[in-house]
Image (tube, rainbow, N blue to C red):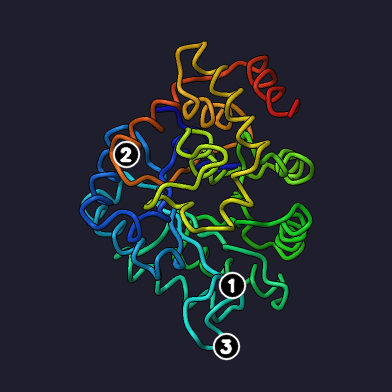
Amino acid sequence: MRYKRLGRSGLKVSAVGLGGNTFGRFADEKATARCIHTALDCGINFFDTADAYNNGVSEEFIGKALADRRERAIVTSKVAMKTGDGPNDKGLSRAHVTDGVHASLRRLGMDYMDLLQVHTWDAETPIEETMRALDDLVRAGTVRYIGCSNFTAWQLVWSLWTSDRHNLASFVSVQPRYSLVDRSIEKELLPACQQFGVGIIPYSPLAGGVLTGKYEEGKEPPPGTRAHGNDRFGSQHGTHQNFAIARHAKQWAESRGHTVGELAIAWLASHPEVASVIAGVTKPEQVEANAKAAAWELTPEEVAEVSGLTERE
């Protein structure tokens, strides 16, 4: 397993991580433990979850699986999404951030989390209030590093400027959707991360299964899959253009003795700004396949060639 710095921090994370949004929904407690223990055996040390993943069950399952292995894991969770019916049960106010983090730690059964990421931008809360609350958590040792998720470039830069102006803890990471079929972050967010040394943690690297051939163009998604009955999934991933990109990528990967899934992850991991590529799993075999992709280091020329496959569509 390769390890990369998380942005400009000194923290080293595995080039491939484990996403927790399937735990508690598509994987029960025992299946979650098998996946996490397999990940550790493969050298994966980065485990991503959120308080909103399956009403906190993901955090509970991850915490139990790591109970006697905590020192081997980099654990990250998120706060901001709705977790209750009260007016302060969502967002990035000092109240919700602080309460949310302590609730996450109780579910995880941990004294601290390595990385806390705010899950989304909150237009109703001044960014200074959020950054001061996060700084307090860092100073208290409750969280060690902070990051953000689903931020645009201007939101990230404004947050960094606020931290710099007030001498507060600063974001070391951003977690956006990024894959061979969704490269929208390359226009503004990726250059901002390059400029300011923020590590990128891509999610949905396999485009929900489109890049691995789980779905066929023009056919209904099979029952039991994430796309079945999910119109939002289809509009995001199941387009003619995306299926065409998947076909080109598959041909390119197989001509070099690899799967398209390995290529999808290896292409992302080969970007210097990308710290860890996370993907949701339900089986240990999927963990092993994702970990294998980390060993494939594409050259800059190969990265450019693969990028060209998607640009021609």
Q: Residue at x 76, y 55 (%)?
A: 157
Separation (CA) of disc 2 from disc 1: 33 Å
Separation (CA) of disc 3 from disc 2: 38 Å
Q: Is residue 156 visible?
A: yes
Residue 42 in the image: x percent, y percent? Answer: 31, 32
SS type, badge 3 = loop
Residue 193 in the image: x percent, y percent? Answer: 70, 43
> Which quadrant holds the C terminus?
top right
**In the rendered image, the vertical position of residue 44 relative to residue 256, given as above or below:** below
Q: Would you call the spot at circle 1 few (<14 residues within 10 Å), some (14-19), or many (20 or more)?
A: many
Which residue is identified by label 1? 133
Looking at the image, is mark 1 or mark 3 earlier in the sequence? 3
Q: Quadrant of residue 312?
A: top right
Q: Quadrant of residue 1?
A: top left
Q: Residue furthest bottom?
A: 86
SS type, badge 1 = helix
Q: Is residue 8 visible?
A: no
Which residue is identified by label 3? 87
SS type, badge 2 = helix
Q: Residue at x 63, y 54 (%)?
A: 171
Q: Quadrant of residue 76?
A: bottom left
Q: Dots 3 and 2: beta carbons under 8 Å?
A: no
Q: Dots 2 and 1: beta carbons under 8 Å?
A: no
Which residue is identified by label 2? 39
Looking at the image, is mark 2 or mark 1 earlier in the sequence? 2
